Structure formats: structure tokens, C-alpha cells
Image (cartoon, coloured by chain):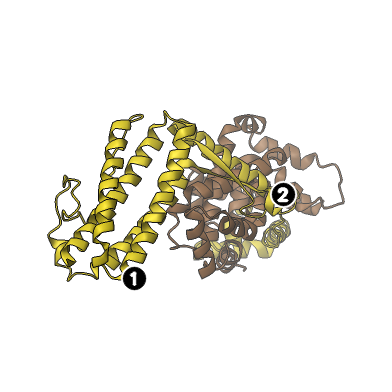
Chain colours: A brown, B yellow
Amino acid sequence: MRTSGARRISLQSERHGPMTSRSEIADAAAAADGDTRAFERLYEAHVARIHSLVRRMLDADVVDDVTQDVFIRAWNKLGSFRGEAAFGTWLHRLAVNVILARRKQLGRQRERYAAGDEAVDRRAAGRETPGLAMDFEAAIGRLPPRAKEVFVLHDVEGYKHHEIAEMLEISDGTSKSQLHRARMFLRRYLDG
Amino acid sequence: MHDEWTERLSEYLDGALGWDDQARLEAHLDDCAKCTATLSGLRQVVARADGLEDQPPTRELWSGIVERIEAESRAGQSRAGGDVVDIRGRAGVRNELRPWQRRLSFSVPQLAAAGIATILMSAGAAWIALSSQGDGSELASAGGPDAGLVANQAPRIVAPPSVTLTGTDLPLITKYETAIEDLEEALRVGEGNLEPETVATLRHSLAVIDRAINEAREALAADPGSAYLNTHLANTMRRKMDLLRYANYFATAQS
């Protein structure tokens, strides 16, 4: 049986970046003092990861805007980064908070997908190209919001259920069930 | 029974089942081709998720970030009643903006803070140089915060308190100007008692402060009603007075 614990650990270190290097700590400190060149270096190092996270969790039309929001929020909060965790981890958690806040603002998205299980089944059944596995990223984009959030945070970003439960203000059990729903949904697309 | 295990396949995949449940599910999998196929599909999903690669944005975003930081800074300064000075060409922006096109804003208070830091560093060098003229005991006998503007009075060693002006305060600034003139005249008479190196350091520090005073006067000429600029000018002049008092104290002590 495959246990994903080890995968998650490696995922955490790879995706959240290695332990913050001295140069990154120095750049964070310099940026906190107003050095935009140092902040630009941090941006260059992490923008792909943050942009991908935002893209997977929100609709395409707000991805660039929210990515910018993340870095602006980071700029304003750099003083709270103490170097105790990897800079990438700190930035990633901040990004998740920004994304979830934006998600709340975009409540209409929730309404659109509010039908729950039925919505998952309808979308799975309604794939347009049977026999062809659709682009996996696009399939993630078609998940209902809650299932997408849990799936991205757990299977892509490597968070644990109790962490996800805290971030999304749901129970561990709900996080697990949403993850399973998402995986089942995506499995059908891969099978297609 | 079948649905029960289907719902738990993800937990099994994640190693989250207890030993008993795990053993029972594995026994079920031995007899259930459908659940085995589902499990295989879920494994593929997890593997695909694990293998996703991060992609950078297709559009240049950095310049927008800089502009929004500027805008927030400007809005913040506006709310605080400060002025903003735009500075171009401090750092580079990829693609859309060339290095010399990059706009970066600093508020007048930020620039003034940098100026004050320079003044303090420069004045600090002068104080160290002056302190080396004595045995250090003078530092312990420093006068109180209301020490008068007398040339040979023991200076305060602690950083001078800031004054806060609510608007143009010409009487106070005029009072400082008069005191500075007196202190400068006294120093001209007494600086011969100081080491040449000390005098050189002192003159350099005074020149730095004079530049800051002149810049503050110029800014004030453009915006006479600015409480901030009036305060900044008064505080800078106050620092010059403190340094001059300190220098005169040592010059007198050496005579």
C-alpha cells in the first residue's frame, strides 16, 4: 500500500522551497526596510509557485490580480517574517489567506457551485471528449470550490487535513470527504 | 459494504486507516475488481497532482505590483497629510519597464527620516571626536533638557527631544537661528582649543546639518503651511544647536 506521508513531507520541502537561504533572509530583511530590489528578487524566486497556486484555486480572470495582491500583502507584512520558517512557507501561507479572502469576496462563485454532490456528478457526466483525458489542470479548475480548495491544498501543496481544516474553518472529516470527492471526480476525467 | 469501502479508499491511499480497517479493506480489495480499479484511478490522480509543475505568469506582473505599492503609499501619505516625492530609475523592472523607467515613491517623511539618520550619524562622529578630547566624565555631568543656549554650558548627551509644531512657528525658528549664530561665534573663538582632527570632523558634521536645514527651508518655501516641514526644520536646527553646545563645552573645558 502506498502511504502518502513521505510524499507529503517531500512535497512540503520541494513546493514550499528549501529552508530559507541566507540570501533570502537578507533579501527579506532588506525588503522589510524598503529595498524594492531585494523584494524583486524574492518575487522572481517565488512568483511561479504563487501564481500557480492562485490559478489552481481561483477563476482565471482574477489570477493575475490576486497574485499581485499576494506580493503587495507580503510587502506590507515583511516585518512579521522572522526567518523562523522558510520564506517560501511564510509566503505560501500568506498567499492561501489572500486567496481564501478573495474567495469569500467572490461569493457568487459559491452560489454557482452550491449544488454540492450533484454538481460534481453533473460535471463528471458532462465531459465533452470521452476517450480523451482532458488537461489535468483544467479538470482541477472544474471542481466545485470547496473540493478544489481541499484537493489543491492537500494533494498539490502538501498540507495536512488538520491544517486545511483550520484554514478553511471546516472539520477534519469534511476535509477528508471533500478530498475524496475531488479525487473521484478527477479519476473519472483521467479514465475518460 | 461496497460503498463503505469506496468512500474510504482515499484514506487508505493516504495511510490514514487504522490497522484493523486497513486489513479489512485489503481483504475486500482481493475480492472486488471495481474497488481495485477505483483505487488505481485514485493513485493516478494523486500522482498527477504530485507531478504538477509551477508555471510563471504569462503576463508581466511586477510593474503592476510596484505601481500598486506606490499607490498605497501615496494614499497612506495622503491620509497622514504628508507629501510624496516620486523618484525614477532606482531599480529595474523586467520586460515592460526599463530600469530608468521604474518609478518608486518615497514620502517626504521617509526622505526626511533618511536625512535625519545621516545627520545623526554625522553628528555622532563629531560627538565621538569631541568625547575623545575629554576623559568622559563630562558625559555624566550633562545638563538637563532645559539647558539654556549658553555657549559653554554642559550639553545634553541624550538625543535631543523632538519638538512638534502645529504650523508655521517663526518665533521658535528665529529663536533657534539667533542661538545658532551665538554658538557658532563662540565656537569660532574657542575651536583653537580642539584637536585639528576634531575640528575637521565637527565642520563636516555641521555642513551635513546645514545642508539638511537648507533643504528643509526650500521645501518649506514651497509649502509654508506644512506642520511637518516646520517641525522637521526646527528639530534639525535643534540638533545643530546641541552639537554646537557640545563642541563649545569641550572647547571651553580644554582652555
Under mark 1, the amino acid is Glu
**Residue at x 47%, y 41% (from the top left corner):** B108
**Residue at x 40%, y 50% (from the top left corner):** B210
**Residue at x 67%, y 39% (from the top left corner):** A62
Quick check: A57 left or right of B194?
Answer: right
Query: In the rendered image, which quarter contains the N terminus of chain A?
Result: bottom right
Q: CA distance from mark 2 to mark 1?
A: 48 Å
Under mark 2, the amino acid is Leu
Quick check: A69 left or right of A143?
Answer: left
Dot 1 alpha-carbon crowd within 10 angstroms: few under 14, some 14 to 19, many 20 or more: few
Residue at the front extreme of this rendering: B189
> On residue B238, which mark appears?
none
Label count reads 2
Horizontal and vertical percent position of residue A192: 82, 51
Horizontal and vertical percent position of residue B229: 41, 37
Q: Do tags 2 and 1 sit on the same chain?
A: yes
Is residue B92 something that shows in the picture? Answer: yes
Most foreground residue, A154 or B176: B176
Determine which residue is flagged by label 1: B197
Horizontal and vertical percent position of residue B131: 24, 67
Determine which residue is flagged by label 2: B97
Q: Report helix, strand or loop for mark 1.
A: helix
Horizontal and vertical percent position of residue B26: 61, 65
Q: Chain of mark 1?
A: B
**Residue at x 62%, y 68% (from the top left corner):** A2
Quick check: A87 left or right of B62?
Answer: left
Most foreground residue, B31 or B107: B107
Dot 2 alpha-carbon crowd within 10 angstroms: few under 14, some 14 to 19, many 20 or more: some
